[in-house]
Image (cartoon, rainbow, N blue to C red):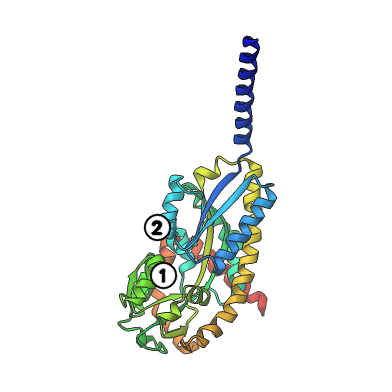
Amino acid sequence: MTRLKTLIAALGVAFAAHGAALAQDIKPRLIRFGYGLQEQSNQGRAVRLFAEEVEKASGGKMKIRGIGAAALGSDVQMQQALIGGAQEMMVGSTATLVGITKEMAIWDTPFLVNNAKEADALLDGPIGEKVKARLDEKGLVGLVYWENGFRNLTNNKRAVARLEDLDGIKLRVMQNNVFLESFKTLGANAVPMPFSELFTALETKTVDGQENPYNTILSSKFYEVQKYLTVTNHVYSPWIVLVSKKYWDGLSAAEKKVLMDAARKSRDFERKDTREEAAKALAELKAKGMQVNELSPAEAARMRDRLTRVNAGIAANVGMDLWNEVQAELTKLRAAKR
């Protein structure tokens, strides 16, 4: 009888161990997806949709945990975490990747595109794919481009109606040489700074101003600490959804497909959402007391002319072949509209 009890106990232990192993097998993959803006922003909404699509398509075997408000660090810090394999996914500005992949600087070219249609055609076409593919050798995998939007200036010193109005304004820019060089060339005192530090820097007057799309100005509540907004549309700024290559290489083909399909759905949702919100955001910023003026075409042309040397530097940095390819594609897109 004692032997029988011992056998039953042993079988019980074996079954428990087997059950624990099975439970381990079906435990979902948890993927941390970091982003810089608040949860209620366009970024946050798109991350939520991405998470829903991944969970649905994987039957609950893959779960995305969106972590916003730069809780996992700045774009640059998260990129390094992905490269090292300490974090799985993120979305951030292409501008902060220039130090890793120089070709990303093509998207920072001032006044490169005239509208969102041109941007979509470049980003989703062969040129965008080619630039994105260069990340692989650096330990990152680019899935899709999202839209941050056309960037505009805010500051607390004066309305910027002419090129000369930028003189001496201490302007926060992204940690990116093209942005630094561009605004120095335009006369501003350009200060590189992570986005996560920006609100406090504006509030304490460490910097006078910044430049971002309407949606970000609104969702980050910059209207609380900024008086003037100038519609410049000086750069079209994309975001890019990234995966750690170390993590990506460990996924099955089916799991990679789940992430890629969900990323494409999130891209389409995010762009539509961002564009609809941008139209409303400007009116809301005016209603919240910001003084808004639009840069005239003549002044925009003066800025563009002043930046000729910066554009030549971008062309040399990304390679003349890529630069010429982009210009040829834009010429073709614009000719097709006529």
The image's mark for residue 99 is 2
The residue lying at 45 percent from left, 84 percent from top is 229
* Vertical position of residue 28 compared to residue 321: above or below: above
The residue lying at 57 percent from left, 77 percent from top is 278
Q: Quadrant of residue 305?
A: bottom left
- Of labels 1 and 2, earlier in sequence is 2
Position in image of residue 140 (x %, y %):
49, 50
Q: Amino acid at mark 1?
A: Ala
Position in image of residue 103 (x %, y %):
46, 59
Are the residues tagged 1 and 2 within 8 Å (C-beta)? no
The residue lying at 43 percent from left, 76 percent from top is 211
Which quadrant holds the N terminus? top right
Labels 1, 2: front one: 2
Q: Is residue 317 left or right of residue 267?
A: left
The image's mark for residue 312 is 1
Position in image of residue 315 (x %, y %):
44, 66
Position in image of residue 134 (x %, y %):
50, 52
Most foreground residue, 109 or 26: 26
| Alpha carbon distance from label 1 to label 2 | 18 Å
